Each structure stands twice: as structure tokens, then as C-alpha cells.
Image: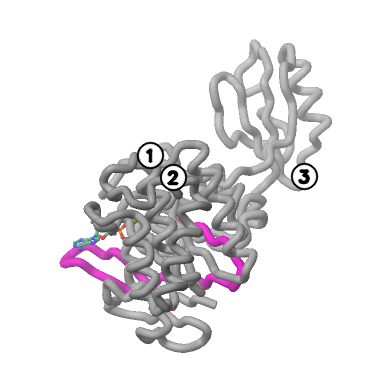
Amino acid sequence: MLELSALGRRYGDVVALDGLSFAVEPGQVHGFVGANGAGKTTAMRIVMGVERADAGSVRWRGAPIDAAARRRFGYMPEERGLYPKMPCARQLAYLARLHGMPKAVARERAGAWLARFGLAERAGDKVEDLSLGNQQRIQLAAALVHEPDLLVLDEPFSGLDPIGTDVMVEVLLEQAGRGVPVLFSSHQLELVERVCDAVAIIDAGRLVAHGAVESLRRGDGPDLVRVDVDASAPSWWQGLPGVGLHRAEDGRVLLELGPEADPDAVLDAARAAGSVRHFGLVERSLAERYREVVGDPREAVGQGR
Ligand SMILES: Nc1ncnc2c1ncn2[C@@H]1O[C@H](COP(=O)(O)OP(=O)(O)O)[C@@H](O)[C@H]1O
Ligand SMILES: [Mg+2]
């Protein structure tokens, strides 16, 4: 298990991390979500030992992390760190050897990952001569080539086409399947929701929500019902017990139904107000939950602070 405990980090006046704690279990695909500048990269860099924490600690399998343990980690940094002029196969084999693999095994693993990603015939090409999508595949292979005990991937899906995305998902699930804890950051909430067992949502260096994706989605809020009615009267739901407006969206409304609300009464009221085009319980999405704890996810990309 990987445990981040009360991590703190400042850069001058900027508080990048402010008491961040959560854990990633063996075999778990764990998402890491937050607006630009929320502190995801800083936290991952601290886990990888390329950045120091001002406060708190990171533990791996119950102990502080030493160099030997860290050599068994696989990391995809945000600023992709490959040697552009080195041929793909040589580069991967070199990285595997840095992580302690014998030469023959390193070569074999490098070849196997290239084949896996459909890049066998590019083995002798320089990394810089590949398309960005293929460079990203090499970057993933670089994180995996030494068969790591832990995977830490900083925005591995950014810039991937749909096929690249599928391959990435497949590989992450496969790694988790062999017991590896996988922590990755992403802005793509639908993807995080689809792929992850658990997710940590951070805002301004603080954890604002954490847990199994399923329970996070459900949350502890009221049921949500989407009603699309061609109503002449605005606020036709007002006065119904336990019913409140959650959000109005493109003429439709999302209503909150508390424990005392009667869905039949809501439907009756909608029918009385006009012609009902849609009436149904809404599964809360991770994006919905994110909106509740952080803000509009559409503002998450390119927001900075
Ligand atoms: N090396 C650095 N020097 C100064 N400020 C930094 C540095 N690294 C990160 N920060 C600041 O720390 C905050 C968190 O950044 P970061 O961890 O990169 O967030 P995220 O990965 O979630 O976008 C931001 O305000 C960022 O500007
Ligand atoms: Mg980042």
C-alpha cells in the first residue's frame, strides 16, 4: 500500500499541498483529480522523491521509501522524460537496466513492450521521429519496462487518441490485475469514473473527496430527478414537499428529492404544468460530484491559479 500522510509543500507564498492524505491499495486503479494547480504533480513528484515535502510523509508497504524501493516504482512524469535522439528499443532497455534488470532481460522486456504497442518495426527509430501518440506509448513502456511494484502516472491520457486511450486503459487494468497499485492524474472525469476503483479529488492542495468511485458518485445528497417539461408556469415544482431545484439546464430542470418527497406527486405536478418529454432518476456522475465539491469541471482545464 502507498500512503500519503499530511503532505505539505509551499513554493514561496504558494501553498501547493496543505495536509494531503490518502492511500492507494494493492491492485487498485486510483484516480487523482483536481483543477490545474491543485497540487497533483507536486504530490506525485514527492512520492517519486524528485521533490521534497515540507511536512508529512509517504510510506510504501508500511515503511519510509528508500532508493531500493523507489527503483521498483514506475513513473510517467508530466514533462515527458525521454531522450529524443535515442532509438526506442535502446532507450527502453537502458531504462530497464537503470532499474536493475540484467542486460538480456532488459532487452527482452523492451522488445516485448514495443511489440505490445505495435511499435516493433520502430525499434531502431529515434523517439523524436515518432508521432506524439507513439512517443506517449514509449513513455508508458518506459514506466513499465522494469515490471514495477507501483505505478505513478501524471496525466497519462493527455494527448492520446481514442485507440491510445483504450490501450492505456487496458494496460492499467492489467497492471492492477497483477496487484500493482496504480495512481494516475487526469482531467477526464468520465474516464476516471469508468476505469478507477477509487479516486481522490483535491482542491488547493487539500483533499476534498476520497473513496470508492461508486460511493463518491452516490454521495450522501438527495436523489436527483431530471424533468423535461414544456411548462407554461415557471417553478411548477414549488410547494411540493421535499422538492428543491438542483440546477436548471437548457430548459430542463434537475430537482432534488429529499426523504419526504413523493416522486409520483412530482410527476403529477409536471403533467399538470405541461407536456412531459422526460422524467427520470439521474445517476450522479463523478462530474456531478466534482461540481459539488470543487466547481464546474469544464473550468478545470486551463484554469491555473
Ligand atoms: N517548482 C515550482 N515552483 C513554484 N511553484 C510551483 C512549482 N511547482 C508547482 N508550483 C505551484 O504549486 C501549485 C501546484 O502545482 P501542481 O502540483 O503542478 O498542480 P497540478 O499538477 O494539480 O496542476 C501551483 O500553484 C503551482 O504553480
Ligand atoms: Mg500537473
Please give the name of the residue rendered at 27% of the width and 76% of the height, measured from the top-left corner: 52
Q: Position of residue 134 (x, y in %)?
A: 39, 44
Please give the name of the residue rendered at 77% of the width and 44% of the height, measured from the top-left corner: 260
Does residue 229 appear left or right of residue 130 in this picture? right
Does residue 179 appear left or right of residue 201 in this picture? right
| Residue 260, numbered label | 3
Asked whether the viewer can see residue 40, the reply is no
| Residue 299, numbered label | 1
Q: Would you say the residues marked 1 and 3 are in contact, meaning their CB atoms lie under 8 Å apart? A: no
The quarter of the displayed image where residue 102 is located = bottom left
| Residue 38, numbered label | none
Question: Closer to the observer: label 1 or label 2?
Answer: 1
Q: Nearer the viewer, residue 266 or 162?
A: 162
Q: Would you say the residues marked 1 and 2 are in contact, meaning their CB atoms lie under 8 Å apart? A: yes
In the rendered image of this protein, does residue 157 appear above or below residue 20? above
User: Which residue range is magenta in the image?
Assistant: 5-32
Q: Name the amino acid, label 2.
A: Gly
Label 3: which secondary element: loop
| Residue 295, numbered label | 2
Q: Quadrant of the N terminus?
A: bottom right
- Residue 9, magenta (yes or no): yes
